[in-house]
Amino acid sequence: MAGEPNIKTLNPPRVFALDVLRVFAIVMMIIFHFIYDLKYFGYVAWDTPLGNGFRQWRSSIVFCFVFAMGISMGLAHGKGRRPRAFWIRLGQIFACALLISAVTLFMFPESWIYFGILHFMVIASLFTFALVRRPWFSLLLGSLILVAFWAGWVPYGWPINLISGLPGYTEDFASPFPWLGVAFIGSFIGQRLATDANFNAKISCWKRGGWLGKLIGFAGQRSLSIYMLHQPVLFGLILSARLLF
């Protein structure tokens, strides 16, 4: 129909640099969780995940995931909302978050994951999607969230910590403050890139050449699957090593 955007023009280009950021976060996450699993099985006594150094390492991993998610949202919907693609992806993340809650409730009933990184991604996706096409408001809101957190006006864990009956300690937690601020700023950057007339030309030099580039592109497009599968694989490898050696 006249006046309606061509759906092909709304499809965002694949940005190799964004896949690099995702894969960097994935690799760091796998290493972090491998160390955590070694402690869980009694092979090391390192103070993970909350010890000095480990806590900062985890925060840097969360930052990479959330920042990449925000940029992706801005790129995907900056020229116009794509509701079907959004709701399908959101449903996948939500289902994975529920699965993680169910599994950890069985494995760690005293510290099950009720608001981990995937739960946070669901909420952050809804907020950033609501403000897509409003990049400067996204930037302003994201900056205000970060300032409010750094100034101590909003405590870590708010408002999730207001819910009674939840464990005092959980195996994974992604606080809305400050991470929503990072998501909004990432969305601002993605929206600005999506509406840049020369953006496609600018990213044409970011080719994923060679086997390493293809591997990064493959892993970047399957980050959710890798996130869900890496821990069962690590557990299986460590248990197998214990049985064999």
Image (spheres, grey):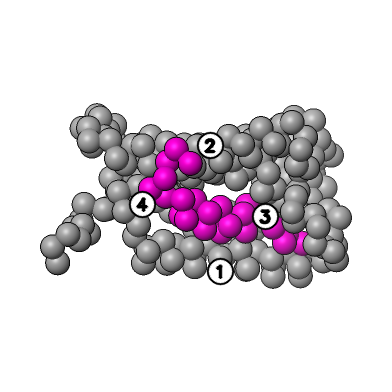
User: Viewer-nearest of labels 4 and 3?
Assistant: 4
Residue 134 location (% of width, % of height): 42, 45
- Is residue 197 in the magenta section? no
Mark positioned earlier in the residue sequence (1 or 4): 4
**Which residue bears the numbered disc 3?**
116
- State which mark lies toward you, 2 or 3: 2
Q: Is residue 170 above or below residue 28?
A: below
Question: Quick one: label 1, few (<14), some, or many (20+) residues within 10 Å?
Answer: some
How many residues crowd mark 2 within 10 Å: few (<14), some (14–19), many (20+)?
some
SS state under label 3: loop
- Which residue is identified by label 4? 77
Disc 1/disc 4 C-alpha distance (Å): 22 Å
Front disc: 1 or 4: 4
Name the residue beneath numbered marker 2.
Answer: 140
Q: Earlier in the sequence, mark 2 or mark 3?
A: 3
Q: Which residue is rendered at x = 79% and y = 30% of the image? A: 52
Q: Quadrant of the N terminus?
A: bottom left
Which range of residues does the magenta coloring cover?
Answer: 111-137
* Distance from Cα at disc 2 to Cα at disc 3: 26 Å
Does the rendering let one see residue 211?
no
Q: The residue under label 1 is which amino acid type?
A: Ala
Residue at disc 4, secondary structure: helix
Q: Estimate the spatial distance between the alpha carbons at disc 1 and disc 2, rounded to whole Å.
A: 31 Å
Q: CA distance from mark 4 to mark 3?
A: 25 Å
Name the amino acid, label 3. Gly
The residue labelled by disc 1 is: 95
Left/right of residue 162 with respect to residue 182 in the rendered view: right
The x, y position of residue 79, in whole percent, is: 30, 49
In magenta segment, residue 118? yes
Hey, what amino acid is under mark 4? His
CA–CA distance in space, label 2 to label 4: 19 Å
